[in-house]
Amino acid sequence: MSHRIHFLIFTGLLLMFCSCRKENRFEWQVNQRHMEVSLNKESDSLYVIHLNTDQPSHSVWKLPYPVYQFDYGDVTGDRMPEIIVGVIKPTRFDPKPDKRLFIYRIADEAYIRPLWLGSRVAQPLEDFRVIREHTPVLIRTVERERSGKFLIAEYAWRGFGLDFKEYLKRETEEKEHAGLSVQVRMPSSDTIRMSFRKKNILKVSLFSIV
């Protein structure tokens, strides 16, 4: 009996460990080229995005800020996904470190390049989710109202940046009401990997469900 209990405990711990280490990935094949994007944590305030392909080229982009979210989506509608990163940093006009939203594109199928480094959205950003069910994707945000409550808004790409689309809710009490009940969260592991496959970029396993 005791052996069975020990076995069940061991199995449970093993499943917990495996689920914590499960990597988030999606695949894309472009012109016979396979791509893989990874985010490496060098320290609490330094993250590095790596882009690897099956060609000799290798691209990196350093983020000298804490990262609170890492996601993807075809923001511009060109069938190549962009890398969407939530960082915590000050700006020239807002010296207090706060949550920001950065978007990076994959240029020439080989290089990471900034697409949009927005200092903020309409109100201070609390969290965001990429709505991949819509093409091009929408960015759904939770933002802090002046009252201390929260609003839910959606943004779409237009020309040179994110353009406000609509408010879904105003003056809501809890962030969970924002439609972000399923969110991408930074895992405890130091490396997150994603790989791209062109046909279906809507399937993704989330880091966690909260």
Image: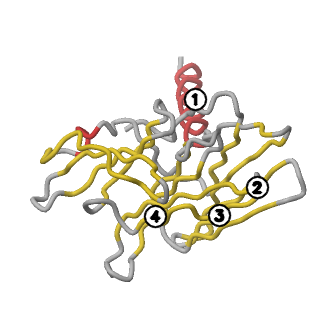
Q: CA distance from mark 3 to mark 2?
A: 10 Å
With 167 as the anchor, is 36 left or right in this view? right
Badges 1 and 2: C-beta atoms under 8 Å apart?
no
What residue is shown at x 34% (from left), y 39% (from top)? 180
Q: CA distance from mark 4 to mark 2?
A: 25 Å
* Along the viewing direction, whichever of 209 and 63 lies nearer the viewer: 63
Which label's residue is closer to the chain start, 1 or 4?
Answer: 4
Residue wearing tag 2: 108
Q: Amino acid at mark 1?
A: Lys
Q: Amino acid at mark 2?
A: Asp
Which mark identifies residue 113? 3
Which label's residue is closer to the chain start, 4 or 2?
Answer: 4
In this rendering, is residue 138 above or below 146? above
Q: CA distance from mark 3 to mark 1?
A: 24 Å
Which mark identifies residue 203? 1
Give the percent coordinates (x, y) of residue 34: 80, 42
**How many neighbours does mark 1 have within 10 angstroms: few (below 14), some (14-19), or many (20 or more)?**
few
Q: Amino acid at mark 3?
A: Arg
Residue wearing tag 4: 87
Query: Helix or strand or loop: what does disc 3 sit on?
Result: strand
What residue is shown at x 29% (from left), y 49% (from top)? 142
Which label's residue is closer to the chain start, 3 or 2?
Answer: 2
